[in-house]
Image (spheres, rainbow, N blue to C red):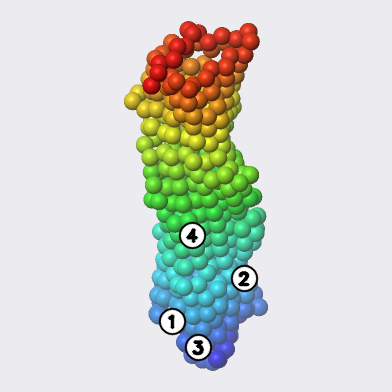
């Protein structure tokens, strides 16, 4: 291995052989060092060059054209800018500040952002195998940026997505920091782990293209949440996803944790499949069911919330569930085994209500005017002083 060092304390062009200490351009197998006494800009603007390693000190390294391949480790202590051409990183690469407005960053390595400011602007293309944000990294996405490699966001880092822009993650991703801004975070395929400490305040969060996300910490999200058909969201034991804004769900929500609609409006559309252990409506949530849904977990509906069952669709409950809000619509409510409790605040105004092998506890005055069918072994238990109107007669099924 030969070390080749930038030999002038001035701005310059990588392609200027006279500015290197050996009087020639760095070549394959060389370890390259750029570390001038005063900060300067060294520009790779033309040619196809390959080196073994590149170490840049307190200088600005610019790739504006051509191609530069670094076969092993690279470090840029101050600022790396890519405005054109291709920078291929095939080993571990660390960057303080970073700015990419065009060109491509590729390779089999991992690009790690340290504490500092980083930005993707305009036509940046990122195809490197790995991309990592260390604590203190503050990255801005000012374009529609798709990344298919392994993404790792550590606690203490942040990503800010500008309005009308997107960060699309199509590979494996781990997020433990902040994602903010007026844009959209999309999990578009791949597997994603949202860890304890993650904080999503971005305007839009989308699961699409068979994305498989796992929530390993409790998260409250107030933006617009969209879950496409074919995607999955798993909530770990002891953890919660609280959606307080507008949401549309058409995929699977599973796991031993809790899904809470805590205010806002939610649409459950075709493809929605809830197998999560607990499902809660609270804080004035207004939920509309636009599909047939069977739910076996623990359903809790708080006072002041509403659940609307759309025409030709039904909600089948098979667990131990509690109601204190409004259930309405032209759809069908089915109790199929289990124990169901109506507490003060509950109202029932659906077109059809079926009760099979279930126990229904009424702890308030409840009026129901729709069609009802009951199996032989269904049981009503009405607390003293409360009523169920009109009196229900069993229809033997």
Which of pointers 4 and 2 indicates the residue nearer the eye?
4
Q: Is residue 242 visible?
A: yes
Assign a secondary structure to mark 1. Answer: strand
Q: Is residue 8 above or below residue 360?
A: below
Badge 3 is on which residue? 29
Residue 77 image label: 2
Return the residue nearer the eye: 395 or 325: 395
Return the residue nearer the eye: 68 or 228: 228
Assign a secondary structure to mark 3. Answer: loop
Indicate which disc, 1 or 4, sits on the residue closer to the N terminus.
Answer: 1
Give how far apart the Cα atoms at labels 3 and 2 are: 22 Å
Q: Are marks 3 and 4 in contact (CB under 8 Å)?
A: no
* Left or right position of 131 against 154: left
* Left or right position of 145 against 137: left
Q: Is residue 145 above or below residue 10?
A: above
Which residue is at a point 52% across and 87% down the rendered structure image?
30
Residue 275: x percent and y percent?
49, 41
Give how far apart the Cα atoms at labels 3 and 4 are: 32 Å
* Left or right position of 385 against 119: right
Badge 4 is on which residue? 172
Q: Is the N terminus in the top left, top right, bottom left or bottom right quadrant?
A: bottom right
Give how far apart the Cα atoms at labels 1 and 2 are: 21 Å
Residue 162 image label: none
Which of pointers 3 and 2 indicates the residue nearer the eye?
3
Which residue is at a point 41% across and 13% down the rendered structure image?
370
Residue 214: x percent and y percent?
53, 50
Give the class, few, some or many, for how many residues have Cα within 10 Å of label 2's Cα (few <14, many ≥20): some
Indicate which disc, 3 or 1, sits on the residue closer to the N terminus.
Answer: 3
Residue 49 image label: 1
Residue 355: x percent and y percent?
45, 22
Give how far apart the Cα atoms at labels 4 and 2 are: 27 Å
Which of pointers 1 and 4 indicates the residue nearer the eye?
4
């Amino acid at each position: 291995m030969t070390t080749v060092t930038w030999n002038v304390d001035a701005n310059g062009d990588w392609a200027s052989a006279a500015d290197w200490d050996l009087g020639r351009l760095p070549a394959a197998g060389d370890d390259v060092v750029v570390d001038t006494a005063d900060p300067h800009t060294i520009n790779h603007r033309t040619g196809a060059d390959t080196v073994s390693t590149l170490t840049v000190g307190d200088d600005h390294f610019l790739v504006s054209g051509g191609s530069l391949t670094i076969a092993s480790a690279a470090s840029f202590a101050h600022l790396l800018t890519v405005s054109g051409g291709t920078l291929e990183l095939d080993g571990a690469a660390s960057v303080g500040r970073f700015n990419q407005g065009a060109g491509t960053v590729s390779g089999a390595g991992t690009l790690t952002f340290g504490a500092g400011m980083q930005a993707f602007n305009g036509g940046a293309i990122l195809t490197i195998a790995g991309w990592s944000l260390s604590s203190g990294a503050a990255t801005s996405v000012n374009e529609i940026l798709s990344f298919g490699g392994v993404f790792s966001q550590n606690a203490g880092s942040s990503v800010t997505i500008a309005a009308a822009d997107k960060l699309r993650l199509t590979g494996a991703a781990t997020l433990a920091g902040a994602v903010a801004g007026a844009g959209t975070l999309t999990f578009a395929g791949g597997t994603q782990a949202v860890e304890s400490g993650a904080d999503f305040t971005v305007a839009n969060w989308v699961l699409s293209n068979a994305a498989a996300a796992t929530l390993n910490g409790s998260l409250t999200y107030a933006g617009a949440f969209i879950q496409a058909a074919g995607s999955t969201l798993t909530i770990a034991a002891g953890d919660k996803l609280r959606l307080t804004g507008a949401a549309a769900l058409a995929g699977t929500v599973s796991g031993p944790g809790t899904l809470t609609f805590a205010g806002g409006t939610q649409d459950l559309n075709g493809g929605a499949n809830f197998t999560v252990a607990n499902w809660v409506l609270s804080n004035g949530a207004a939920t509309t069911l636009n599909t047939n849904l069977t739910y076996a977990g623990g359903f809790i509906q708080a006072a002041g919330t509403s659940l609307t069952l759309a025409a030709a669709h039904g909600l089948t409950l098979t667990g131990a569930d509690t109601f204190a809000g409004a259930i309405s619509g032209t759809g069908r409510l089915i109790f199929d085994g289990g124990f169901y409790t109506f507490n003060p605040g509950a109202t029932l105004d659906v077109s059809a209500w079926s009760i099979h092998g279930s126990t229904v506890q009424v702890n308030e005055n409840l009026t129901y005017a729709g069609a009802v069918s009951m199996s032989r072994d269904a049981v009503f238990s009405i607390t003293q002083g409360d009523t169920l109107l009109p009196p229900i007669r069993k229809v033997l099924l």
